[in-house]
Amino acid sequence: MRERIAEALTGDPSLPTGALFTRARQEWGYQGRRSAFYALAKSVRPAAAPALMTRFEGLPGEYAQFDFGQAVVSFAGGRKERVHFFAGRLKFSRYMHARRTPDERSESLVRAVVDCLHTWQGSPSQWVFDNPTTVWVRLANDRRELHADLRQLVADMNVCVEPCTPRMANQKGAVENLVKFVKRNFLPGRVFADVDDFDRQLAQWLHYVNQERVCDATKEIPATRLAQEAERLAKRPVPWTAATYPLRVISTVGPTGLVTVHGTPYSVNPRKLGAPATVLVRQTTMEFQIGDESVTHPRDDGSRQPHRKAEHSLAEVAMVTEGRKRTYIKREYLLNLGPAARTFIDQVVTQQIGHAWYPIIHRLYDLATAVPATVFLAACESCHRQQRYTAHAIQAALNGEAA
């Protein structure tokens, strides 16, 4: 086996031991244990030639290092929960920022980076990341490129991004490993009442490590050295907060006047059917830009429930001249308001003979578009409890009158 292993490694020194073991079993007649074969292969494999290690230090405002981390933390009552966090650090001053994140997806990454830059009041010219898939997307021929969401932010800030060399963390110089630093200096011995308490204690700890603690690498307090970076950082201002930075999604206005983003349809001007739409996805809102028009909806990922604005429904009705279509469009608007409206409309339609429900739908539509959707839905629930399925009953409920 030793000679066969040596011969195989001479042809391909990078051949994995697992591939050698498979070949030994299938072609060389090896019948021994896996552990024994791995030990033998290790003794035969030539030692790798030492690589030159290049350590570097940053200039003021030049480098920032970012990374995701996660840890199981303790909460009051003995509950334990896995928490994700994101950390960033300026290389020159060692001034750092960290925040809890819901996950380690690309949007969380981008918003966390913006939060760091906003805290530092500017951006360094180069960003250094580790190698997660939320940063780098692998292409054919072992090539890779930045994730589209991060690539957008990089273009907006006009910065250069560098990856860490795999398994060569020491090349990052004297900057302490961000994730280990948080885990070893912030988390040990702490119990949190809830996630809000986690955020509060994290903010207190960040104040200590930035404003009071002397950094082991520089022998200075990070806030003191940050003053030397402030002028260069200010030349790259950050015009957004983590919540207001807009991720861009390109979509199209569908045949029903809706644009679907992240699993939820949103209404736009129905006269723009088929037009391309640029969607600015912020943390709590969706802004739809279609030509020179713009409309904003509250963000509601994955609900699949259409979000319609009254003015869009009115415009859609105005585009339809035939009475039956007009009535059904108004009914569709009411049905999409929510389960309470759907239950109420179902009773209205089934209790009427023929098309006698047409005028009721028109009246209900007028009432629904005159008040917030939540108010109309509450009226529907009240009338359903009273088994009263008329437009007059809804009017009375909206007016706060007794049934």
Image: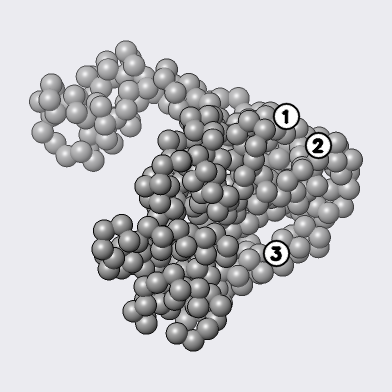
Q: Secondary structure at mark 3?
A: helix
Q: CA distance from mark 1 to mark 3?
A: 29 Å
* Location of residue 338 in the rendering, given as x and y in whole percent from the top left corner: 42, 62
Instruction: Tell me the amino acid under the disc marked 2.
Output: Arg
Q: Secondary structure at mark 1?
A: loop
Q: Which mark is residue 380?
A: none
Q: Nearer the viewer, residue 201 or 334?
A: 334
Drawn side of residue 175 relative to residue 107, left or right: right
Instruction: Tell me the amino acid under the disc marked 3.
Output: Ala
The residue singled out by tag 1 in the image is 158
Decide which of tag 1 and tag 3 comes sooner along the chain.
Answer: 1
Residue 92 occupies which quadrant of the picture?
top right
Q: Secondary structure at mark 2?
A: loop
* Location of residue 388 in the rendering, given as x and y in whole percent from the top left corner: 37, 77
Q: Is residue 302 visible?
A: no
Q: Which mark is residue 203?
A: 3
Instruction: Tell me the amino acid under the disc marked 1.
Output: Asn
Label 1 crowd bin: few (<14), some (14–19), many (20+), radius 10 Å: few
**Comparing marks 1 and 3, which lies closer to the viewer?**
1
Q: Is residue 22 above or below residue 60?
A: above
Q: Which mark is residue 236?
A: 2
